[in-house]
Amino acid sequence: VPELPEVETTKRGIAPALLGARVLEATVRERRLRWPIAANFELVVRGQTVRSVERRAKYILIGFESGTLILHLGMSGSLRLVKPGIAPRVHDHWDLHLDNGWVLRFHDPRRFGSLHFTAADPLAHPLLRKLAPEPLSDAFDADYLYRATRKRKVAIKQLLMNSQVVVGVGNIYASEALFHARVAPRRRAGRVTRVEAARMAAAVKRVLAQAISIGGTTLRDYVDPEGSPGYFRQELFVYERAGSACRVCRSPVKQIAQGQRSTYWCSTCQR
Ligand SMILES: [Zn+2]
């Protein structure tokens, strides 16, 4: 599943080819994504010039003069830049043909991705308007996280993964951040201290920023006509390391189920 660092890396990978380019034509091969692609999509983007490429949570926003494309990679989606002669593969659902010789191509075997166009402020769109702060923004800090945990009975890991508290902290990064913050994943959110909230906010930022910086080294994959952007993985401390020695204390890493997801943690390092 593409997590926030993969989406940010995708945005950075495609932006240079998109900015200032004009859409010659849009081609849709499969409209049935998570929501159907609007019937007028090809018409509204034709002739439009890309003015901005942004990210909000796990949405990529491609801004034109007349509006904004809001796209989501879903469970298995990826974007590539290909040359016009490259034949589409199975599950290549739509293309944007640009006047600079690039084709932006969307691939998604499971079709949980989405594509919307809005002529209004994209941040006011129903998909985006209620989103919580970005984890890498100044709005997500020790004070904010401490306040968000008060009187909450839910486990701290569930709270970190709640997109109404902070967006884009998926299962991998919640486990890893809690390890670095030395907070046990099942701790009741309302019981974490201010100092722990500060450690958690810093750890979330650090694991995400590190993953994005590692992703930066794979940018060339976005213009590889044969391959698909390989999702990268930084050196993980606990995630999917059940039974292996903790990299800090050598105790075996533990695995538990939380909200139907696996949580990995070290019961010696995390309290
Ligand atoms: Zn440990």
Image (cartoon, rainbow, N blue to C red):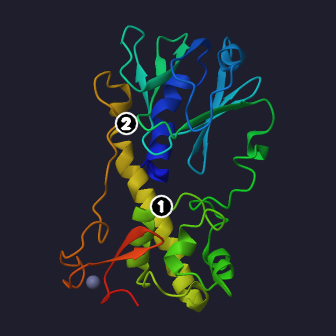
- Looking at the rendered image, the disc whose residue lies closer to the viewer, 1 or 2, is 1
Tell me: residue 122, above or below residue 52: below
Instruction: Dividing the image into four quarters, tell me where ligand 1 lies.
Output: bottom left
In which image quadrant can residue 246 be found? bottom left
Label 1, label 2: how many angstroms apart (C-alpha)? Answer: 22 Å
Q: Secondary structure at mark 2?
A: helix
- Please tell me whether residue 248 is drawn above or below residue 89 in the rendered image: below
Along the line of sight, the residue nearer the viewer: 219 or 231? 231
In the image, what residue type sits under mark 1? Gly
Q: Is mark 2 within 8 Å of ligand 1?
A: no
| Mark 2 Cα-neighbour bin, 10 Å: few <14, some 14–19, many ≥20 | some
Residue linked to disc 2: 219
Amino acid found under the numbered disc labelled 2: Leu
Q: Residue at left 53%, top 67%?
A: 161
In the rendered image, which residue does mark 1 sit on?
170
Residue 13, given in percent of the width and then of the height, sits at 45, 34
**Upstream in sequence: badge 1 or badge 2:** 1
Q: Position of residue 191 (x, y in %)?
A: 57, 92
Q: Residue at x 48, y 71 (%)?
A: 259
Q: Image height check: is 128 above or below 234?
A: above
User: Left or right: where does residue 49 sit relative to residue 175?
Assistant: right
> Which percent across, then down, holds residue 57?
59, 51
Q: In the image, what residue occupies the spot 74% across and 56% down? A: 130
